Amino acid sequence: MNHLLAYRRYRLPLRVAVRTAHGVLAERTGVLVRLEDESGAVGWGEAAVLPWFGTETADEVAAACAVLGERVMAEQLAAVPARLRCLRFALQAATSARASASQKHLPVAALLPAGLPALKKIAPLAEAGFRTFKWKVGVGDAADELALLDDVCAALPPGAKLRLDANGAWQRLQAEHWLESCANRPVEFIEQPIAADARGAEDLLCGLANDYPTPLALDESLASEGDVERWLEVGWPGVFVVKPSLLGDVTGALARLAAEKAKVVFSSALETTVGARAALRLAFQWPGEARALGFGVWPLFADARFDGPALAPFLRVEDVEKINVEAAWNALS
Ligand code: MG
């Protein structure tokens, strides 16, 4: 089947700069694609590149689209190389038919700021209905942050769960101290306690996961094509944080995770509406146990036309289907 391919680059300032483990992100760059098939059906996709996460750059996506040209055969779409994994996700999203959802609604995790400011945020978020909270750790001094854990847990509403995300900031000893302290607390998991590229990271993460009762989650460790398969092969007992936008052949990876009954958390890569709808559709189609979404990121952009559904304790499948991806495309013309 022939497709007509069009693409538009974007460079969008964020409302408020986002602090990440890799520095401050003040604007988001990427590429939107539009594919029209011979029957006139149109689909959109987004290459939400994050080069510091190991993806290709927006320049590389645009160059690859230019090489594909305006008329593209299905085989050419399938032959886009694995290293262009954001583009592969975009093309997959733009050509896949909408599948039926397994879930009607999914809870959303609320993000807490690092350090002491987290404490003041919990009560209003709990009041709004949130029951899963994600607290960034590994930002300040590890001992100071650990001393706050008790207060953060005490501030949670009954039945709530806390996710900790260290973004790879700890050494083994710090990770062990945290895991000891988390043992009898309502901690759902600790995300990426050890850096993905630390020496012996795989053995270290597996050792920690097996030695302590609190589950661990992989995020940065799933940064290139084949990582999901590798961690499935070593029998990773913890959670897989899946950022669909960064996973390349996401359909293949999710099928493998589902077959292994893996624990999966779907998470944002700070996409516009276009990538967000595709990523959220996959989250709603996930056949395994439903976990709170890591999509509490909007409003994100200075131009609200690119924002997904506003932060709320739950997202409904209708909220996802209401996302107007064409408006984002048109806004770039
Ligand atoms: Mg993370």
Image (tube, rainbow, N blue to C red):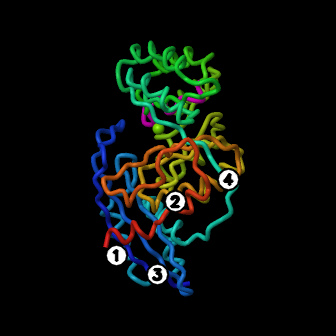
| Secondary structure at numbered mark 2 | helix
Residue 233 visible in the current orientation: no
Q: Earlier in the sequence, mark 1 or mark 4?
A: 1
Q: Residues within 10 Å of mark 3 (few under 14, many from 20)?
A: some
- Separation (CA) of disc 4 from disc 3: 36 Å
SS state under label 4: loop
Of the two numbered discs 1 and 4 in the rendering, the one whose residue sits closer to the viewer: 4
Element carrying mark 3: strand
Q: Which mark is residue 104?
A: 4
Badge 2 is on which residue? Answer: 277
Which mark sits nearer the N-terminus, 4 or 3? 3
Quarter of the image where one finds residue 187: top right
Image quadrant assignment for residue 195: top left
Residue 193 included in the magenta stretch of the image: yes
Q: Residue at x 56, y 15 (%)?
A: 180
Tag 1 residue: 66
